[in-house]
Amino acid sequence: MLERLAEYWLDSANERGYQPAFVQLLVSEGHRVLHSTRHAPIEFGKDVISIAPDGVPCAYQLKGNPGGRLTHSQFREIQPQLQELVTQAIPYPGLPDVHHRSYLVTNGFVDEEVQRAIQDLNRAWERNGFGAEALAVLERGYLLERANALGTSLWPFGVADLGALVDLLSHRGNDILPLSKMHELLSTMYRLAGRDPAPAGRELERLVTSTALLVAVATRNFGLSANHFAVASAWVLFSTYTIAACTRAGVSSTGPIAESLSAARQAVFEEVAALIDEASARPTLVEGVAWADTEFYPARRALLNGIGSAYWLWCRRDDLAPANLPAVEAFLPQEFGPRALWGEAAMPQLLAHYWYISRRDASFGPERWLAQLLATVIRCQLGQEDAEFLASPYYSIADVVRHRHADFLGTANDPFDAMSFRGASYFAEALFHLVVRTNLKQHCKSLWPEFTRLNLRWFEVAEPWQFCTIHSEDGLACTKIVPPTGEWAALQQAAGIHDAPKVPEILCADPVLLLLFVMMVPQRATPDVVRFLGREFSEIWFLP
Amino acid sequence: MLPDWPDVKDEVVRAFMRRLAERVRQRSVAGVVVAVPVHEGHGHFIERADGTTEERLFERAGAQVSIPADAVSTESLADMLARMEPMIESLARSTSQTMLRTMEEGIRSVGNEIDAAGRPLTAELIIEALDRVEIEFDSAGRPEWPTIMIHPSQQALVARELARLDSDPELNARATAVVERKREEWRAREASRILVG
């Protein structure tokens, strides 16, 4: 039955949908994947570039023919790209100076006429010195055989515990990714729940590939809906749960696992880039039923600003210059929306946006906005001036809307009691420390008395690997009561701490992934993590 | 399986659990404190303003009710809810006991307990207790009185002693002096909310 699921997925995915899984198959066969995005300058008909285990570079052109065939007319359309694929060298620094292998990949069948045309082309290329069978074809049967050998055969699901996978497969795909279902799937794959021994060594390597294929299959409907944020979320979670499995097993992510993580990172980049492309091309950011969008629009805008900012920071950090970068800069506002702070869960998005603006705006305006954000959090959580309490980061915008409109939607669906957030904040301490780093001392002095009335909260996992999951049964719900009198020097010292001991080293080594993860799982944006990310993404540092 | 209507039954269960939590809060010590939902973990940790810390594991509170199987075929949902009443009482009691035990441990650990040595609660003891605790005041300087938790059998006695505290000039003067001292402590506390350096 699991084989049929893989078939069902492959027969419905477009090339963008099956590319991440295909790349994971290459990794499992020992390839080092160098390039797997349509948003980087290297193209020349090459969607994926890898180095095979024998050291020969390989270039792949992917085509989507779900449930169908690559016809002769389609082939004629892509023939110029195939010409480039085979005949033009791969412009990638450091590649071995040998002719590369070229592959045309399709998830459909290949028409007989097309096969003959490829044979003709291969003969011509051979005469011109490009070797025998310059262009090889990998079609549906090959992909399915590899997917089953490396993926479905390792899925540890009996019919009884297929629930989460079936739920995801039957999901409409137009919603936020159900994180709890992904948690169930990924925890099962890596045996993170319970006291089972952690998979390690070759077993873990095989599981990583298998899990990647599962993620691709499970997010089929999200991919078909071009729901880029959901698909990006899935690959972010794949990465963090893989890091959890490595950390728990006490193994570093090297070799094939590092390659898998790198391939997943490229998949995230691709989806985030596509999301920002779509958002910046739209005349309006309204989605779905327009008249019911009023409560969600500001949250969507804040999320897109956060994701777009993370993308910009990512490009800056990795020295990337994708073609859409100017459009991203045009899309991202240089100021903050008035309704962006709908709950504490929005804070990582707002912080990413702040770090972006701060890098682009040389004035102290963004830093004053940061202090203003802290003032707003304090005012809301103390219930001053009739401000609405901000829900804790465990509650999504959907929960907030259900609560705000409980009179209309029915009180049985009200997910929280707003009074439970009174006098407490999960982000006030981290914000305060970021403001201290900006040296806005007078702002800090004026905010301090009210700040000390707040209980500072965060959740601390028992073991670092648990940080990478969206829910942990082991850990402490922490509360800190601030002493009434504070000293500026001590505060500066605390604000200067920027290590995150409860975050696995592998995740700390990739701050972009960590930033995206806490946008999706905001309860993991503890004060330690925010201080760490602030150090990584902000150039503001006025500490002795 | 037999035909079933799980979706609406789940709604009934959710509504019941919500009402249960509300009733337990009303009928237990939990009703006088702010409830903070905890979403994950196995315990909680607190760091106080004086730097002291405390870590505690979560404690499970539970209660059970037995309902004869044949009652389902003859009774209504309202009857079922009525059958749950003893369970609600039991849960409220065990919640209160757990919270009181925790509070008592906390009070003893800082030496704030007053041992009345078996004597009944008096106005003098109330003044002594007020003198031991921290009292907050609102922005207009009015005291936010602490909650006195007593056994229901003591209600009349406490009411009488509070009345005595109001009417007896000497007791009233002592209580007023305590409140004034607490007000000064509160003012000092508020004035100390400052970032220096």
Image (tube, rainbow, N blue to C red):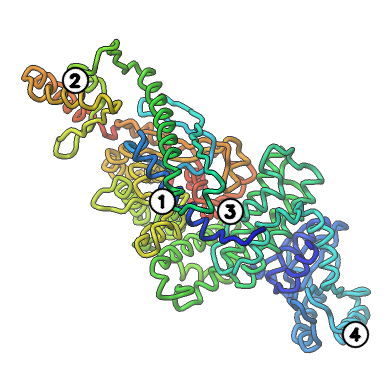
Say if labels 3 and 1 share a chain.
yes
Q: Position of residue A506 (x, y in %)?
A: 65, 44
- Give the amino acid type for the residue marked by disc 4 in the picture: Arg
Residue pointed to by mark 3: A180
Q: Seen from this angle, which residue lies furthest left?
A: B169
Q: Chain of mark 3?
A: A
For marks 3 and 1, the one nearer the N-term is 3
Q: Chain of mark 4?
A: A
Marks 3,2: beta carbons within 8 A: no
Q: Is residue B87 visible?
A: yes
Q: CA distance from mark 1 to mark 4?
A: 65 Å
Q: Is residue A362 visible?
A: no
Task: Say left or right for B110 vs A355.
Answer: left
Q: Position of residue A342 (x, y in %)?
A: 39, 57
- Give the amino acid type for the residue marked by disc 2 in the picture: Ile
- Give the amino acid type for the residue marked by disc 3 in the picture: Ser
Could you tell me which residue is drawn at 66 percent across and 46 percent down? A243
Q: Nearer the viewer, mark 3 or mark 2?
A: 2
Say if labels 1 and 2 share a chain.
no
Q: Chain of mark 2?
A: B
Secondary structure under tag 2 reads helix
Could you tell me which residue is drawn at 31 percent across and 42 percent down? A444
Marks 3,1: beta carbons within 8 A: no
